[in-house]
Amino acid sequence: AALVLRDLGCQVDVYERSSTPLQDRGAGIGLHSMTVRHFVENDPLDMERVTLTLPWVRFLNREGAVSFEEQMNYQFSSWDTIYRALLKNFSPDHYHLDHEVTNFRQDDTSVNLCFANGNTACAGMLVCADGVASSARQRLQPNASPRYAGYVAWRGMVYESALSTSSFERLADALTYHLTPRGHILVYPIPGPEGELMAGSRLMNMVWYQNYSEGDELHDLMTDKNDEVRTVSLPPGMVRESHIDWMRTFAEMHFPPPIAEVVEKISQPFVQAILDLEVSQMAFGRICLMGDGAFAVRPHAAAGTAKACADAWALRDALRDTAGDVQSALRRWEPGQLALGTQLLERTRSIGDSSQFHQSWVPGDPALRFGLYGPDN
């Protein structure tokens, strides 16, 4: 959003609540055309330097044999790789760390902001892109809160070089799935910590969806090493050893050997509660909600990042088409983004429920294919 609005001619400042540059946020991401549109249209960056293309989608049975495969050519990268590439194009003078917004108010001409560090700012428009736990949304849409979907994602990464030769060869060229009675797991390569793309120097990314009952079972899992209960995610290094031991034991007992090896060799897994979140309003005068701050969708369409990018590009277009009239632009922008968020949430909810609760996934079903606007789209 900052880049496309800057390129339109706006003076843009990003106020980041973290006191340090962001890293290790979310591991792997699927790349849609919307995700990389800024690079394609505005940046000389060679996409082959940040992207992995995996020719196969593959399902393994419990013994590790291929039960189904099809050629898909999905593209993947890592959160860190894309973040660094975007940030490189934005002026550090306008990227402010340690600026957590504590209050804001608007009038007919401007929005005034107060920060936890005592600083203040004034702007013509405020874009709230502060994630699933958005403090801005809690103020603007107090009745909109995340709803637990009934399962979590265990996540983590391991260097490909740490895997046995047989596991590496089975997993290196595919998005690889395995279905279980209470969920499913997928593993796939992503760029290494410094963007390495060569096979053998990359990371193998794991996402394992497992049902946990709301209440005591989920509460126990989401209680970290310091006895703090997390509501959205347990970061790397904070999952209690008893749960990590269970994770590795379950993998050995139930997963195909190549996938089990990935799980067992992840040193610092983390856990993401799968949530559904939707708002009824995204535009509020001179203020808007964007990305996960407005709609948090389940990861099954690999389109959450693409949805956030679509919000940004549509906002650029609305400001351009209204000659910079912020309030008119936001009124024009809102209906389409509400519709897109609702549609994507409904689709990912259907995919997730079919796997986790109905056991009705059929490998090769076109409805399961990634896409922002629908399967393959």
Image (tube, rainbow, N blue to C red):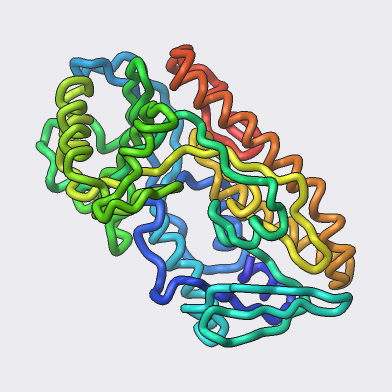
Residue at the spot x=22%, y=46% of the render? 240
Q: How many labels does the image show?
A: 0
To which quarter of the image does residue 114 belong? bottom right
Where is residue 164 shown, x and y percent of the image? 10, 37
- In the rendered image, the quadrant that contains the C terminus is top right
**Residue placed at 48% from the left, 78% from the top?**
97
Q: Say if residue 56 shows up in the picture.
A: no
Residue at x-position 80% and y-position 52%? 334
In this rendering, would 359 be left or right of 206?
Answer: right
Relative depth, front residue between 28 and 7: 28
Estimate the x, y position of residue 220 in percent, counting from the top left.
Answer: 31, 38
Query: Image check: 332 left or right of 301?
Result: right
In this view, the residue in front, 194 or 283, is 283
In the rendered image, the quadrant that contains the N terminus is bottom right
Q: In this view, does 236 lie to the left or right of 162?
A: right
Residue 82, image x, y percentages: 45, 60
Q: In this view, does 127 lie above or below 216?
A: below
Query: In the image, is residue 299 above or below residue 24?
Result: above
The answer to which quarter of the image holds residue 176 is top left
Residue 221 can be seen in this image: yes
Which is more toward the observer, 154 or 80? 154
Q: Is residue 371 left or right of residue 201?
A: right
Residue 89's x, y, as percent?
52, 75
